[in-house]
Amino acid sequence: MREYFTYILASKSGVLYIGVTNDLTRRLFEHQQKLIAGFTAKYNVNRLVYFESFGDVREAIAREKQLKGWRREKKIALIEHENPTWQDLSAAW
């Protein structure tokens, strides 16, 4: 069974990015090494602070869209509920 991830990255200054992928390790590497020009590279958004896994890509995309529609305060509350210290969850990978 394939696994899909909806994830939230943060910069040290608190900029948030929400994305979806089928390979979280690879995608984080791409963000951290700035291999893809764009928002995360420009704003140095490279710390994994939250993620969820799904068995269906449509569910992962729907969740990504839902989270992107939330106000910043609600996104922060979600992160802090699961990761109160905003640790980089990929640091040990």
Image (spheres, grey):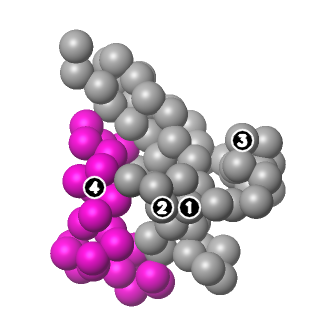
**Residue 26 located left or right of residue 47:** left
Residue 66 counted in the magenta span: no
Q: Distance between the residues labelled 1 and 4?
A: 14 Å
Mark 1 neighbour class, 10 Å CA radius: few under 14, some 14 to 19, many 20 or more: some
> Which residue is outermost to the top?
1
Extreme residue toward the bottom, this view: 42
Tell me which residue sits at (78%, 53%) in the image. Answer: 84
The nearer-to-camera label among 2 and 1 is: 2
Image quadrant in which you'd find residue 34: bottom left
Of the two numbered discs 3 and 2 on the same chain, state the one appearing first in sequence. Answer: 3
Residue at (47, 83) in percent of width and height: 43
Tell me if 14 is positioned left or right of 88 in this view.
Answer: right
Residue 12 seen in this snapshot? yes
Q: Name the residue under label 3.
A: 82
The residue labelled by disc 2 is 91
Q: Is residue 23 magenta?
A: yes
Q: Distance between the residues labelled 3 and 2?
A: 16 Å
